[in-house]
Image (cartoon, rainbow, N blue to C red):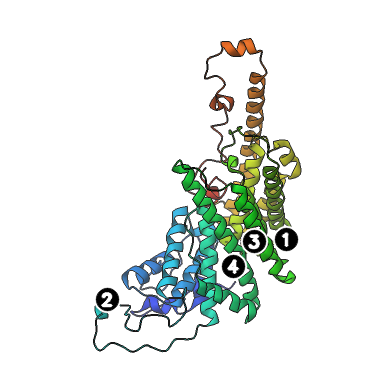
Amino acid sequence: MPFEDISISGPSRSSQYWKLPARTTMFVACHSCYPQPLIIGEAHPRHTVPEFNRSANAVEADRNMDMLQGLITWLSWMMDHNREKKTLCLFSNIACSLVFDLRLDRTAGQEYPCKETSAAFAYSFPVKSRAPAPKRTNQERRTVLACFCICTSIADFLRSQSMRWTPHMEDCLQHLINNPELPGDRTLAAITQILQVTDDMLVAYNSRFFEVEAGLTPKAPLMIYVKSLSSRLDAVTKSIPPEILSDKFVQSYVTCAVASINELGLPYLYDPTDTSGSYDHRNSECVFACIESSKQCLENGVFALSSDDCLGLTLMIVIHLARCTHILYRLCITQHPSVDRQMVRNSVDLFGLMEKIAEKFSKAAHAKGAYSFEASVFMRASVVMRQAIPLWSRTFAETDAAVAAAAQSTSEPQERLTSMPSTAMTPATAGAGTEEFTPMDLSEDAWLDLLTNWDGSY
């Protein structure tokens, strides 16, 4: 991707800046490559994308398509500029607000005849006649679908509320499916269809989480959601043309969606010390589906993506790799009748895949001319991946030791058990030593956040 210094002069610097989406992309690329913000002109040095957004959005109350497209581009870029997860929630909500303000999520022209966007002219006289409905362009359709994709991916990552899907957005989706204008239109439509299922999965997750937090009885078993969402995803994948479905980036969305849906049926993954419950073959099916789909997602990142592809990875693909890595990690330390830890570890070489991903990121950093930890997000990702391997190996060993100790204590003679304090065999004591297990230390570095548990617990 070419890099260019954007020089802007004159009073309307923000409006001139956002009029060129291509330059916005170049600006984001420059900002991601250099540790210091890009200098834009002499009159306004060191302006970053958040500063432009704050000035144009909050101060000047400017709303336009170019600003929305620039914000989507910035959100879709690597994690280099998102130092904390709260920035993702903030700017994704701003993008949703821009879609609403620009009325891209509803049919054009279906407004009240006298409705004014400014409160100062809300009661003007005479009442204005109904303006002719503008024709929706493909650029607007692509923009609203792209905003849905990035906001849904971020909401799935943060377990927050996602962007609302509307009937007009469904019309935009069907229009791009039936009348593709550019080669990427069909791919965008396929990704949107997959993320619609992910959005429904997120609704089911949040609903169950709120029920448990409030102490309410669950309305339906989790397996009902798993079966329904799996059927929907199968129908979506069958409707996608084979040449689109075989794309390595589309495959990343599909495999991660399968893993996330089946993870919904394994609530005990969020508490590895929870050994309660009995064997359920449906849970075992979810375990196998999680293993296979997560393995396919990581192998897709190892073998299908080249070093050049890594240089242009979007935030969503990075989230897929991190999420599937952590799903496999949880399965490897979970002690439950429906999960065989050793079987999981024998089915997938988690540490081998992590090492290969770290090596690929390291090559991408060297191709960009970065060799130090601070110089590139790829180098930081490579270092963090390699540092996670010995930490997680130690956790595996400690988990096995704790489970073995708990099993030995339960096999003692009954007369000795009756002489023990009543608290000796509580679930908390049976899992002693495992409550301190954390995948990695929390840090402000966004790549460490990617490798830690972001989901919360049921």
Q: Nearer the viewer, residue 291 or 26?
A: 291
Of the two numbered discs 2 and 4 on the same chain, state the one appearing first in sequence.
Answer: 2
Q: Nearer the viewer, mark 3 or mark 2?
A: 3
Q: Nearer the viewer, residue 414 or 46?
A: 414
* Residue type, mark 1 in image: Ala
SS at mark 1 in the image: helix
Q: Residue beneath label 1, please?
A: 304
Of the two numbered discs 2 and 1 on the same chain, state the one appearing first in sequence.
Answer: 2
Which quadrant holds residue 334?
A: top right
Question: In the drawing, what numbered circle is on residue 176?
Answer: none
* Residue type, mark 3 in image: Arg
Which quadrant holds residue 396?
A: top right
Q: Residue beneath label 4, please?
A: 192
Contact between marks 2 and 1 (CB within 8 A): the answer is no
Is 341 left, or right, of 13 in this rendering? right
Q: Nearer the viewer, residue 276 or 27?
A: 276
